[in-house]
Amino acid sequence: MWQATFLIFLAMLGGVAITLQGQFMGLMEQTIGSRMSLLITFGTSGLVILLLVPLTGGVQLANWKDVPWYAASTGLLGIVIVGSIGYVGPRMGLATGFTLIIATQLIAAALIDHYGWFGSTVRPIDVYKILGLIAMVVGVQLLTR
């Protein structure tokens, strides 16, 4: 029971952190530009992880060769994610921008689950997921008007 509660809390914490990051990235992007705000964001993240790795057991790359090649794109994807949030947020508003980002994210996730792409477990799309996605698209239409 506590594990499920912890996971829900962690997901909610992540949601708040993403929203705050969107606002803060938007402020930096409008003040110092996209490239510098990304440099500060990822530079700070890099420094923190460089400090954490030695404190938490060091580098463990023995299984690196077993990681699919496309998984190495996560850093580039992070730049796209953070950059788009920072650019879209102040121009469209956080609610509208995140609505579009999250709706697209959920549609992509449903397709990845359904087809088992990129090593994911196949979780077929059923009528309830389709209805949920349709409701979400209607919600996007209402929120972005």
Image (cartoon, rainbow, N blue to C red):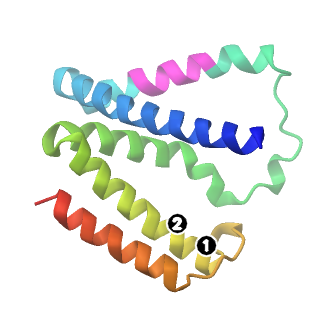
Whether the residues at callouts 2 and 1 have beta carbons within 8 Å, the answer is: yes
| Residue 135 location (% of width, % of height) | 34, 72
Give the mark count: 2
- Label 1, on which residue? 113
How crowded pointer 2 is (Cα within 10 Å; few <14, some 14-19, many 20+) is rated as: few
The circle on residue 43 is: none
Residue stretch rendered in magenta on the structure: 40-48
| Type of the residue with mark 2 | Ala
Secondary structure of the residue carrying numbered label 1 = helix
Q: State the predominant SS element of the stretch in magenta.
A: helix
| Residue 40 location (% of width, % of height) | 40, 20
The circle on residue 109 is: 2
Q: Quadrant of the C terminus?
A: bottom left
Give the camera-side residue of 44 and 89: 89
Q: Is 30 colored magenta in this rendering?
A: no
- Residue 9 quadrant: top right
* Residue at left offset 72%, top offset 60%: 68
Give the camera-side residue of 140 and 100: 140
Image height check: is 47 above or below 61? above
